[in-house]
Image (tube, grey):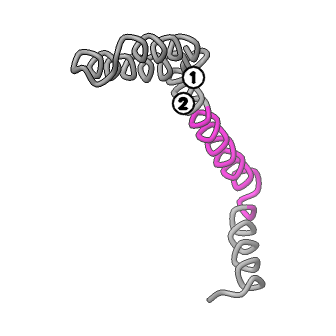
Amino acid sequence: MVSRYELNAKVVRIVDGLMDGGMMGAAVLWSLAVVLLLAVTATAIVLLVRRAGQADPNNQGRHSSTTREAREILRSRYANGDIDDEEYRRRLASLDESA
């Protein structure tokens, strides 16, 4: 494993080597920094746009699909005779309240 001192010394040598070129070395370093900054910014924008596209206002999409599934199950149980009219209406009203 490389010690922290050795790693720092290697980085300093690399930077010194680039800087020995004078303005050319500094230009290379700045160019790399700008490219890195642009890449990070572009990645952040893409992730934010994807997240915004998937976001559902007031979480209605997920909630309504869950409510729809619950209503289908309730209708099926009612149709099969598993629950009576009173139970069906009570549970349906409960679903309407939660929606």
- Is disc 2 surrounded by few (<14), some (14 to 19) or many (20+) residues within 10 Å? few
Residue at point 70%, 79% (across, down): 7
Question: Mark 1 or 2, which is nearer the eye?
Answer: 1
**Disc 1 target residue:** 52
Residue 15, compared with residue 72, is above or below; it is below
23 and 4: which one is in front?
4
Residue at point 70%, 47% (across, down): 27
Q: Position of residue 91 (x, y in %)?
A: 46, 18
Q: Quadrant of the C terminus?
A: top right
Most frequent secondary structure within the magenta stretch: helix
- Is disc 1 surrounded by few (<14), some (14 to 19) or many (20+) residues within 10 Å? few
Q: Which label is found at residue 43?
A: none
Could you tell me the amino acid type at mark 2? Val
Q: Position of residue 48 (x, y in %)?
A: 60, 29
Residue range highlighted in magenta: 19-44
**Disc 2 target residue:** 46
53 and 8: which one is in front?
53
Left or right: where 55 falls relative to 67 = right
Calculate the distance from the C-alpha at mark 1 to the C-alpha at mark 2: 10 Å
Q: Quadrant of the N terminus?
A: bottom right
Residue 24, compared with residue 96, is above or below; it is below
